[in-house]
Amino acid sequence: MGDRMNEMRAPLALLGLAMLLGGCIPQVAPPPDYYRSANNPAPAPSRAGEEQVSALPASQPAWEAHPATPTGRFVPASTYTVRPGDTLRRIADRTGAGILAIARANGLSQPYAVTPGEQLTIPGGRYHLIVRGDTGIAIAQAYGVHWSDIIDANGLSEPYLLRAGWRLLIPGGGTPPPLPSGSTAAQRAAAFHLDIGDLVTGSEPALAGNARPAAPSSTSRRVLASTTPIETPSKLIGGFSWPVHGRVVTGFGPGKSGVRSDGIQIAVPEGTPVLAAADGVVAYVGSSIPSLGGLVIVKHGDGYTTVYGNAKELLVRRGQSVKRGQEIAVSGETGAVDQPSVHFEIRKGRDPVDPLGKLSG
């Protein structure tokens, strides 16, 4: 019995000694990657074997936090004679149509001047009244149409800004397709197909009245609500530099299989810092497009946007201003790739352009 008690006391004595010494031993700081993984837990992979994406804690995308309600009203096609004192906004309110659709139908450009006696074509269709916080993506989801078709129907262009009180013409009759038996509107939204063009031009929340967008944040520590519109640059400063240096394994345009690439794929070792190609403001951070994994989108002004995909760590937030050469992500093997690499795009509006013709340095 005594021998057994001695055996039990030995480990307890060692534990007590360790606790006493613990207060005297300097604490060694964990490596930087520890803080990233501890503070930014990665979501569970969406399919077996997929590498996880670590990102700064963020609010829901605006189209999820503020889904649009399909309350569009049908307006018959007609002709309107401009009255003294009329503005295009007043005409839109009288007819129930949208300013942008009327301007497009009549070849008007800003400031949309009209003269008394002028005959205007009022395009018929279903019009969605925009409310504060609506996004193009949410509106498209609500009606089951492509955001690009709404852009075309209304003649939207840079900076694709929406304002509360405007009405958007919804193509295709504007009636949401019936939901399959047993499904919900949320399930339809989840099944909605997003592409980069949607994120670039349809992810910004609508402004209220004559309000101005919020100023960008200079740090990732400031969290802006997903439904807060963010001011983006009006002018591109300088040119574009390479986000990483590596071997281009997929070029821009149609490949041998006939599948078109809207950017280039650059092979780099996993863990390579991904750098902003130019000064700008972060417009999107997340993983809403499965094939691109961890994704950052930055707006630069003059209609230019850059896209960085397949990252394993996302180091910036939406609404954060970044400088050329600043680290915004860490390369990985997320999404539909078979080796560590970075998907990189440059877009002018919705249209992708060949990055190799724009990159330097």
Image (cartoon, grey):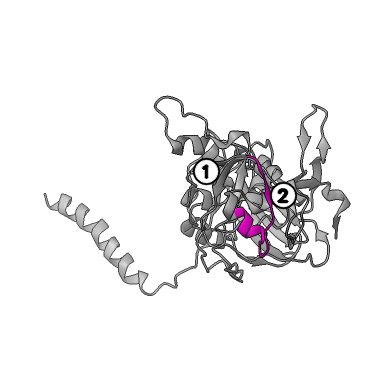
* Distance from the alpha carbon under mark 2 to that under mark 1: 22 Å
Disc 1: CA contacts within 10 A as few (<14), some (14-19) or many (>=20): many
Pointer 2 and pointer 1: residues touching (CB < 8 Å)?
A: no
Position in image of residue 164 (x %, y %): 55, 58
- Taking the magenta stretch, the answer to whether it contains residue 149 is no
Q: On residue 213, which mark appears?
A: none
Q: Of the residues tagged 2 and 1, which is closer to the observer? A: 2
- Quickly name the residue at label 2: 120
Q: Nearer the viewer, residue 165 or 276?
A: 165
Q: Residue at x 57, y 51 (%)?
A: 135
- Quickly name the residue at label 1: 72
Side of 66 relative to 338 (left or right): left
Q: Which residues are magenta?
A: 77-92
- Taking the magenta stretch, the answer to whether it contains residue 82 is yes
SS at circle 1: loop
SS at circle 2: strand
Position in image of residue 180 (x %, y %): 46, 26
Q: Residue at x 69, y 52 (%)?
A: 81
Residue type marked 1? Gly
Q: Is residue 350 visible?
A: no
Identity of the residue furthest to the top in this view: 181
Q: Nearer the viewer, residue 54 or 144?
A: 144
Residue type marked 2? Leu
Position in image of residue 198 (x %, y %): 65, 45
Identity of the residue furthest to the left in this view: 1
Side of 310 relative to 1 (left or right): right
Q: Nearer the viewer, residue 301 or 247?
A: 301
Disc 2: CA contacts within 10 A as few (<14), some (14-19) or many (>=20): some
Identity of the residue furthest to the right in this view: 357
Relative to 325, say whether 121 is above or below: above
